[in-house]
Image: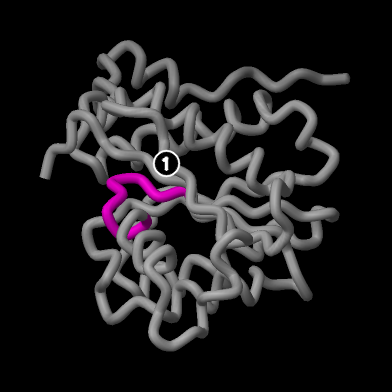
Amino acid sequence: MTRPHPAVVALVGNPRPGSRTLGAATALARTLAGHLGAGADPAVVDLAAHAPGLHAQPRPADVDAALATAAGADVLVVATPVYKASFTGLLKSFLDLYGPDALARVVAVPLVVSATPAHTLVGEVHLRPVLVELGATVPTRTLSILDADLADLGPAVARWWERAERPLRRALGAPGASEAPTPASPTASQATRQATPAPAVVR
């Protein structure tokens, strides 16, 4: 399904209010909204504000609203710091409130903030499987950000976008999603030149 003006939402699983993870997720969501021609500014669901009600019964209205906002996204940035070599329990508790395939219409983009390069695979190993289990499409690699890069996210986001743009647009059915053209077959003369070994150089 083509989504010409996708709704972009940032879901932040850092338990600390006003965290740097929140800043990184908001910045990435705004960048994606600009690249993808979103029709509105990204919404932000900061789970630090909803943590007290996640396990309450009956479930508070603000938690229901947060669940609906995240599930209603076309593009959902799912951001977490690394806690004990995985994503946060706060984010897991929130995602566990969804039923099967609750994120079936969502294109998810994992964002992981870590202190060391040793944890750059947390998003791929731990977070991606949970999002896929909930039905989300996860067409790109995780954007892994080191604490040292948080002051200037631009270069890291630009490098990630170079590889992420085509699969992300394809998942959304957006313009620019077509595959790169297949290289033309070499001409006979080119093939001959390629097949002829270069003369050996004696040193």
Farthest residue to the left: give it. 1
Total number of numbered labels? 1
Magenta includes 71? Answer: yes
Farthest residue to the right: give it. 203
Q: Does 91 sit above or below residue 19?
A: below
Residues in magenta, as a range: 70-77
Q: Does 132 sit above or below residue 165?
A: below
Where does label 1 land, which residue? Answer: 43
Residue 99: % across, % down = 29, 81
Q: Residues within 10 Å of mark 1 (few under 14, many from 20)?
A: some
**In the rendered view, does 21 fall on the left or right side of 183?**
right
Residue 46: % across, % down = 56, 54
Q: Which residue: 67% across, 25% down?
A: 155
Q: Does 62 sit above or below residue 133?
A: above
In the image shown, does 177 or 76 lie closer to the viewer? 76
Tell me the quarter of the picture where residue 158 sits. top right
How is the rendered protein coloured?
A: one colour
Q: Which residue: 50% across, 32% down?
A: 161
Quadrant of the image for the C terminus? Answer: top right
Quadrant of the image for the N terminus? Answer: top left
Tell me the quarter of the picture where residue 34 sits. top left
Q: Give the amino acid at mark 1.
A: Ala
Residue 8: % across, % down = 37, 40
Secondary structure type for disc 1? strand
**In the rendered view, does 128 fall on the left or right side of 18?**
left
Magenta includes 91? Answer: no
**In the rendered view, does 3 fall on the left or right side of 95?**
left
Q: Which residue: 72% across, 48% down?
A: 19
In the image shown, does 172 or 48 lie closer to the viewer? 48
